[in-house]
Image (cartoon, rainbow, N blue to C red):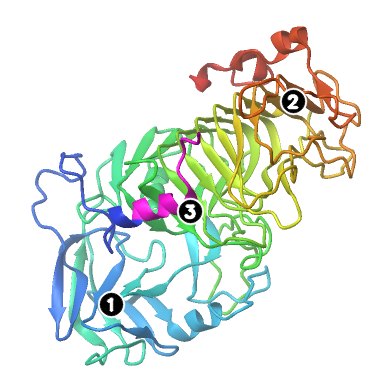
Amino acid sequence: MKTSISAAQVIAAALAAMLLNGCEKPSQDKGNRNEAETLRPTELQLGSVTVFPGGENACQDSYLTLTFSSVPTLGDSGAIRILDSRGNEADMIDMADVAAANAAGVQMTDNTLFSTAMDAVGTAGYYRIVYYNAVTAEGNSVRIRPHTGSLEYGKEYSVVIEPGVIIADGFGGIGSGEWTFTVMPKPENKDEITVGGRDCDFMTLQGAVNYAVGRGQSAAVTITACDGIYDEPIFIRNKNNLTIKGESRGGTVVRFDNSNDRINGVGGSLQSVPQIGSPVGKTGGRSVILVENCDMLCFENITLENSHGHGSQAEVIYFNCDDGRLIARNCNFSSEQDTIELKGWSFFDNCLIRGDVDFIWGYPKTALFESCEIRSCRNDNGGYLVQARCRSADKGIVFLKCRLTAESGVGTGTVYLARSGGNSSEWDNVTYLNCTMGRHIAGSGWYSEPAPNPRKATAENGWKEYRSMNESGVVMDMSGRYSGCRILDESEYESLYSSKEKIFAGCRHGSGWLR
């Protein structure tokens, strides 16, 4: 019997938990504001529309929301401007840019011209260039997201919305000085910050990440996200000892619709923001979360999802840290193709990883999945759990006491444990230890074209299994397995794989961090 929730249940739970502007702060005091702060941002009534935030102490990364008495639609011309107290433009979104970016078939490449429909996500001299949801409409509300870092702590702003930006009964735009708000002071050197509700330190997860980066690379910071949906791309760079945890595993959802159809390649960061109208230079890639030059990044009790769906490479996370460590505990990772891309060292404990094609892949030194559910979803032409491209003869990708399950519609014998990238300079190091495997796993286990490296596995390298079991826990007959895989014997298992310490024997950080 499956104990983890489905992707649909995850989203339903999160939608039930959230409000338009994030979740309500839980009743207990999380210490997320200074005691001297008594004012909170408020809603303002401007004719036929209600707007938020107004007044004092808005979050530095606030969404701007407008709620109408009828269903609005978005226009394709005009601008949204945010002005400081001197009338200088702090930010601008051109609806013609938004309409062009949302047109069918638009894909960002290195030569795409930078526009206001893109965001330079990040801080401290490193930026990820991505399309983002600058202006969205849902029900009777419109949500505007200012560009990352455009608002400054402690400053007053005015929002101007030109006619034609939003089409709604009785709405002709908002002029300068009608909608004003003041951003809260910067939180003082906090090691624990909250995100997601009107009473929290930040409204967006990226805003909280930027604050954590500003504390310095080594300072330990914990971000607690209230239940709700955080529909945003994330960029984390130059930050060690960062923990991001959700209020509840199914109710706190970080998601974004991104894919190779939308932004070409795995991407990376830039050290400056492009000028409007100039080539982006380098895209921020197709993942939801891009991580660079980080160590000891931990996710706990949270759902991370690429909501693109079927048909294109669409990572949830690209952990691009050759010597970094990643930990995930009690988390859901959901996409379809290429769900998780890894480098360095990682440990997934009691997690759900969902996908269809090569959905656990990359260039890891060692990645251990312990007591996880590895769930296959739809696969028109067969599915593959893993593609390991190890650049050294480390343990690679290891599954310990995991359950290999499938959603309805996945055919019997249509999914393979791994397939090779076909590069003789990379090691296909994948090992399954004491795992239960559903009927969707092919009898041969491994997809052999192209052949793996090494073609014939040893106890240390290649494709390996130990005590693979069916859904009833009965050890399977391995006689039909691909001839190049190795069925480990008891002594090989005991000497190389019987503990975390042995699995991570090659890790220069030792194994204490796993605990």
Q: Is residue 8 shown in magenta?
A: yes
- Name the amino acid type tagged 1: Asn
Does label 2 or label 3 sit earlier along the sequence?
3
Where does residue 358 sit, x and y in percent of width and height? 71, 46
The residue that label 1 is drawn on is 140
Q: Look at the picture and state if 115 lies above or below 405.
A: below
Does label 1 or label 2 sit earlier along the sequence?
1
The residue that label 2 is drawn on is 394
Q: Quadrant of residue 216?
A: top left
**Element type where label 3 sits in the image:** strand
Q: Look at the picture and state if 27 lies above or below 80.
A: above
* Residue 396 shows in the view: yes
Task: Give the camera-side residue of 450 and 175.
Answer: 450
Q: Quadrant of residue 452?
A: top right
At x 87% / y 34%, what residue is drawn? 453
Does label 1 or label 3 sit earlier along the sequence?
1
Horizontal side of 63 relative to 155 (left or right) equals right
Horizontal side of 287 relative to 124 (left or right) equals right
* Circle 2 Cα neighbour tier, 10 Å, few/some/many (<14 / 14–19 / ≥20): many
Span of residues in magenta: 1-14
* Circle 1 Cα neighbour tier, 10 Å, few/some/many (<14 / 14–19 / ≥20): some
Res 234 label: 3
- Name the amino acid type tagged 2: Asp
Where does residue 86 sit, x and y in percent of width and height? 24, 77
Q: Look at the picture and state if 457 lies above or below 201.
A: above
**Element type where label 2 sits in the image:** loop
Where does residue 193 sit, x and y in percent of width and height? 29, 42
| Label 1 – label 2 distance at C-alpha | 54 Å
- Name the amino acid type tagged 3: Ile
At x 69% / y 54%, what residue is drawn? 379
Where does residue 19 sit, x and y in percent of width and height? 26, 60
